[in-house]
Image (spheres, rainbow, N blue to C red):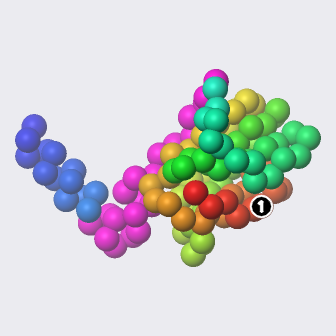
């Protein structure tokens, strides 16, 4: 078991070094019931809202929608379809990301 941890650490480090930090730590979207109080609205339309909080992107929508997140250099971090409600994505690094929710595209600083 101890050896597997070293292998995982080595693979994670190699992934981060050669493919960017997003590869090593990107997670999937998760549904949330309560939002963080420190989240700030970036875009708000009648059916979609995009917010930013430290190390998080939060999307609230009233219908199922495809959400894509890219680094400022264009590297894909996440591409998933989220269910209606509020979902959040924990990001591997602080910075500026391009977020596309359905037909809406914006820059989000976290």
Residue at 77% over, 61% down: 105
Left or right relative to 101: residue 23: left
Above/below status of 64 relative to 23? above
| Camera-nearest residue between 38 and 13 | 38
| Residue 60 image position (x, y, % from top left) | 74, 37
Q: Which percent across, then down, holds residue 35?
A: 64, 32
Q: Quadrant of residue 88?
A: top right
- Quarter of the rendering occupied by the C terminus: bottom right
Residue at the spot of label 1:
105
How packed mark 1 is, by other alpha carbons closer than 10 Å (few <14, some 14-19, many 20 or more), is some
- Residue 100 drawn in magenta: no
Q: Position of residue 16 (x, y in %)?
A: 34, 65
Q: Residue at x 73, y 30 (%)?
A: 85
| Viewport quadrant of the N terminus | top left
Where 105 sits versus 3, above or below?
Answer: below
Point out the stretch of residues depicted in magenta: 14-33
Residue 73 lies in quadrant: bottom right
Q: Is residue 29 left or right of residue 25?
A: right
Is 76 left or right of 10, judged from the image as shown? Answer: right
Q: Is residue 30 magenta?
A: yes
Q: Residue furthest front?
A: 38
Q: Residue at x 70, y 42 (%)?
A: 59
Which one is nearer the viewer's eye here, 103 or 42?
42
Secondary structure category for the residue under label 1: strand
Residue visible at 61% across and 52% down in the picture: 79
Most extreme residue toward the bottom is 73
Residue 64 in sight from this viewpoint:
no
Q: Is residue 96 left or right of residue 42?
A: left
Vertical side of 90 occupied by 100: above or below: below
* Count of numbered circles in the view: 1
- Residue 93 location, x and y as percent? 46, 59
């Amino acid at each position: 078991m101890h050896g597997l941890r070293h292998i995982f650490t080595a693979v994670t480090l190699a992934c981060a070094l050669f493919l960017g930090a997003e590869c090593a730590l990107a997670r999937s979207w998760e549904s949330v019931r309560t939002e963080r109080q420190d989240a700030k609205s970036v875009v708000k339309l009648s059916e979609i809202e995009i917010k930013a909080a430290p190390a998080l992107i939060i999307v609230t929508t009233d219908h199922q929608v495809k959400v894509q997140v890219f680094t400022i250099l264009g590297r894909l971090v996440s591409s998933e379809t989220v269910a209606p409600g509020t979902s959040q994505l924990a990001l591997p690094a602080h910075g500026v990301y391009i977020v596309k929710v359905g037909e809406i595209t914006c820059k989000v600083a976290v």
